[in-house]
Structure formats: C-alpha cells, structure tokens
Amino acid sequence: MSKYIKSEVKTCANLLQEFKQQAQPRHAEKLRFIGVGDKDVYNISAPFEDEGQLVIAGRVESRDSEHSEVHFFVEQNGEWAPREGAPVFKLQDPFFTKIAGELVLGGVEIFPHPTLENSLSWRTVFLKGDKIASLTEFAQGPDGMKDLRLIELKDGSIGMLTRPQGEKGGRGKIGFRRLPSLEQLTIEEIEKTPLLENQFIDEEWGGANEAHLLANGLIGVLGHIANFDDEGNRHYYPMVFAIDPETGDCSDIKLIATRSNFLEGPAKRPDLIDVVFSGGLVRKQDGTADLYAGISDADAQKISIEDPFLDYEN
C-alpha cells in the first residue's frame, strides 16, 4: 500500500472538500418495497444469492419506533417483496458475508438498558447456515457495540472490524485484528482488538458496514463517517478505505457519496435528513459499482459510482 501512505486524520469537512473534486455518483434509484404495510424499509444489505435467487435483507420499522425486524426480499416486476417462507429476525441493520462456504448474517439486537431506566442498549448478533432458511445464532458482540464486521481472508483466517464506544472508542472508532477462525469470535477477542490510528477525530465517529477481499489480498472497507452540526443534526457520509491484513496498516478515508447525490425522500426525524448509511457495494466488470444505502432512516436507494476499490488493487 505504498501508494496509500496514511496521512494525518481527516475530518468530515476535509473529506467533503476532496469529494467535490471527484467524479460524482449518478443514476440514483429508489428501491420500492411492498408487502410490509405502512412500515419503512431502510438500511438494506446489497443483494446476495440464496438458493438461486437474489435476495436483499432490509430493516423494516414503523416511522415512530426503533423496534425493527429484518425481512428478506426478492424482486418481482421491479418491486421487492417479502420472500415467501423466509425467517424474520428481530434485528436492525442487516449485513452478510460468506465464510467457509456458509452464509454469515448479522444484525443489531436491542434490549432494555441494564442500568438506565426507559433506555435501550444494543449488541451485534451473528447467525450462520448454508442458506437463509437454516440460519442459527452462533455469536454475540459486546453490549453497546454496533458495526462489527467479518471477512474471510485468502489463508482462511478471519479479518474482524470492531467499533467500540466510550472510554476506548469515544463516539465510535474502528478496530481491526485477525482471528484464526470463527471459533475465536468471542467478546474477549473483540474487546481487545486495537484501534486503527488517525481515522477519526474525537468529535466525529464512524464504523464499517461491509468488508471486501480485494484481488491483491487487501481488505476494502465500505463504511460511514459522521458528525453533529451546531444544531445537533446528524450527518452520515458513505466512505471507503483499505487495510493491509498482514500489517494492520490502513489508507486514508475517502468519501464516495453524499445525501445530495440521492433522490429526495422522507426522513425519520428532522435531525436525520442528511444521513446515508452504507448498506453494501456490488462491484461490476465495467469499473463501476452499485452502492445500496439507507437514506434518512426511512428510505432505501441505490446509486452508481466509480468502483472505489480499484485504486487499492492497482
């Protein structure tokens, strides 16, 4: 990664200025979900194949609630409908990967906070199986941690991305380490994962949403970086960077889209209007990629961008 020597930490403002000089995303498209009544579908995964069908996992939720379910959808005549007979999980923000030939699906489980009355806490839950229909839970992350992600590396080991908050991670910083296998995915191993250096200032935060194994063995990370403005509004930006799994070194973050690149749509609350939550990236043979994203905690869209991982592979 000599071409991508890590510089000093870049803020959202720095990254936005750089992004304006790049080729802009195009062909934004709303994904239409049916069969869920008046509930929103957002924070979707990228499509993935299961039993010969392309499937999207999506967060299904009432506009005035944080209690959500993960449903699986298949495309029918340009719309995405619930897959008949598929399981439904009481989780948020689904994601997937393939490890040792099995589907690994994750999401965020909420539960009553153990010490704060009328508050919620959360943890990441992992399930695996040879297909969606056989998914069963096999691991949990620490209480209070979202954005745990896994990727199978070329030698069969597991790259693990974490995001502690609080004393270790502040508002949320990304950590990385390798595990010999899924059997070592324990809360103890997660909690002792070192943080990547100089990726976020303390006033901002970010997390990994999806990891890609690149052709040269590097890990391409699709994630988000976020901050608050002076009025308390949240701003979430899709971003990417690369990690060398042999050394743990990482490249600078670069933005790949902003809310203004997508179509207008609803928002869950006024402070969430400028939120794009990276769901997944489908890389294509023509040098472009489709970015699937949750929009303003109420909508789901995709957009075409230049494949952001090609630079790290060249």
Image (tube, rainbow, N blue to C red):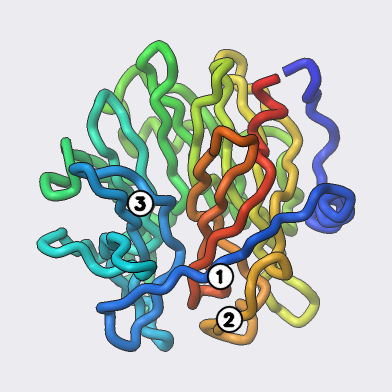
Helix, strand or loop at label 3? It is strand
Identify the residue at horizontal 58%, vertical 48% (top origin).
223
- Looking at the rendering, in which quadrant would you find the C terminus? top right
Q: Is residue 199 left or right of residue 106?
A: right
Q: Mark 3 and mark 2 in contact (Cβ < 8 Å)?
A: no
User: First in sequence: mark 2 or mark 3?
Assistant: 3
Side (left or right) of 36 relative to 129: right
Mark 3 Cα-neighbour bin, 10 Å: few <14, some 14–19, many ≥20: many
Q: Is residue 150 visible?
A: yes
Real-space CA distance between mark 2 and mark 3, rounded to the nearest whole angstrom: 28 Å
Q: Is residue 148 above or below residue 94?
A: above
96 relative to 285, above or below: below
Precedes in sequence: disc 3 or disc 1: 3
Identify residue type, mark 3: Thr
Q: CA distance from mark 3 to mark 1?
A: 21 Å
Q: Which residue is mark 3?
A: 124
